[in-house]
Amino acid sequence: MKRSVLTRYRVMAYVTAVMLLILCVCMIFKYGFDTGEGLTLVVSQTHGLLYIIYLIFAFDLGSKAKWPVGKLLWVLISGTIPTAAFFVERKVVREVEPLITDGSAQAVKA
């Protein structure tokens, strides 16, 4: 597996997690203080779009790492639970790092 697959996943995991936290704050202001309705709409739509990209990259990583369905579902769902993506991303990186093939090492062997 190439390092770029893991990097794409990591970037989207962090971006999705941060956007979800921002969305939670917006929801608190919208429903708790009756302000920020327009901002909440923009943030929710942005998070939704970014979450779709996250799903694609996480599924790509999971299929290349040959994860079982349960693990793949947990990684996919972690983008909907505030702060979960941060923890899941760290665990995924530790598990996937050994599967990364270094292109320069393969070029030397050939």
Image: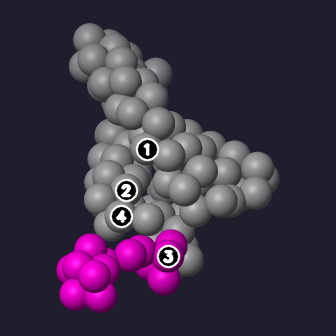
Q: Secondary structure at mark 4?
A: loop
10 Å crowding of disc 4: few (<14), some (14-19), many (20+): few
Residues 76 and 95: in front is: 95
Mark sitting earlier along the chain (3/1): 1
Measuring 68% from the left and 59% from the top, which residue is drawn there?
67
Mark sitting earlier along the chain (2/1): 2
For the stretch drawn in magenta, the main secondary structure is helix
Say which amino acid is labelled 2.
Val
C-alpha distance separating marks 3 and 4? 9 Å
Q: Is residue 99 highlighted in magenta?
A: yes
Residue at which label 4 appears: 2
10 Å crowding of disc 2: few (<14), some (14-19), many (20+): some
Residue at which label 1 appears: 57
Bounds of the magenta segment: 96-110
Contact, mark 2 vs mark 1 (Cβ under 8 Å): yes
Q: Secondary structure at mark 1?
A: helix
93 in relation to 65, above or below: below
Contact, mark 3 vs mark 2 (Cβ under 8 Å): no
Question: Would residue 70 be visible to someone looking at this image?
Answer: yes
Q: Which of pointers 3 and 1 indicates the residue nearer the eye? A: 3
Say which amino acid is labelled 3.
Leu
Q: Which of pointers 1 and 4 indicates the residue nearer the eye? A: 4
Measuring 32% from the left and 52% from the top, which residue is drawn there?
8
Measuring 36% from the left and 18% from the top, which residue is drawn there?
45
- Give the side of residue 96 with respect to residue 17, left or right: right
- Give the side of residue 22 with respect to residue 54, left or right: left
Say which amino acid is labelled 4.
Lys
Residue at which label 3 appears: 99
Say which amino acid is labelled 1.
Phe
The picture places residue 30, in percent across and down from the top left corner, at 39, 21
Residue at which label 2 appears: 5
49 in relation to 25, above or below: above
